[in-house]
Amino acid sequence: MQLSDKGKKLEQDLEHFTGSEHLFYHRLFRNFCYTEGVQFLAQEAGAYWLIDLIAGYQKDKRLQKNWEELQYFQLWKLTVNENATTTLICEDGNNNVVLSQTLEFTDFPLPQIKLFCESHVLLLPSEH
């Protein structure tokens, strides 16, 4: 996938997030929050749906089965394919896929993004 000008600018802007002073609480899942970098990503990419998906999956039985480990760390990868479908994968941090979902369409401007979820906080890897 070739990056659009919007995608290039977003990629450059995301590099500037190296920590977070403020957390945003999810409107439906009150024990789930996200950082300023994730808020910026969602706003600029029109990707609040991504936050909603990840927040909703926190109660999924596939995550709950390994909750002892996954409550502390999850690696989320969103990959956009050439045909505008996308795959969202959750890993445990040891390259073990916990769950995967394919979405039929996205206009997400980046070819891929990785996010961490640590103790109910969704963040960019640069904010770790």
Image (cartoon, rainbow, N blue to C red):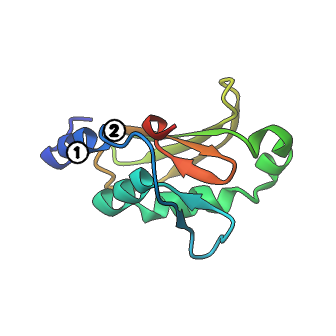
Bin the neighbour count of mark 1 within 10 Å (Cα to Cα): few under 14, some 14-19, many 20 and up.
Answer: some
In what quadrant of the picture does the N terminus appear? top left
In the displayed orientation, state which residue is furthest to the top: 94
Residue 65, picture quadrant: top right
How far across and down, in percent of the image, does residue 79 sit? 44, 39
Residue occupying image coordinates x 51% and y 47%: 123
Disc 1, SS: helix
In this rendered view, identify the residue nearer to me: 122 or 18. Answer: 18
The vertical placement of 60 against 110, above or below, is below
Residue at (51, 61) in percent of width and height = 23
- The picture places residue 77, in percent across and down from the top left corner, at 51, 39
Looking at marks 1 and 2 on the same chain, the residue that comes earlier in the sequence is marked by 1
At 41% across and 48% down in the image, what residue appears?
Answer: 85
Q: Nearer the viewer, mark 1 or mark 2?
A: 1
Q: Are marks 1 and 2 in contact (CB under 8 Å)?
A: yes
> Can you tell which mark lies on residue 111?
2
Crowding near the residue tagged with mark 2, few <14, some 14–19, many ≥20 C-alpha atoms within 10 Å? some
Name the quadrant containing residue 26: bottom right
- In front of the other: 2 or 42: 42
Q: Quadrant of residue 113?
A: top left
Q: Is residue 128 above or below residue 62?
A: above
Tally of numbered tags: 2
In the image, which disc is placed on residue 7? Answer: 1
| Circle 1: residue type | Gly
Q: Is residue 94 left or right of residue 81?
A: right
Q: Residue at x 31, y 43 (%)?
A: 14
Quote the CA–CA distance across marks 1 and 2: 9 Å
The amino acid marked with disc number 2 is Pro
SS for tag 2?
Answer: loop
Q: Is residue 106 visible?
A: no
* Extreme-bottom residue of the structure: 27
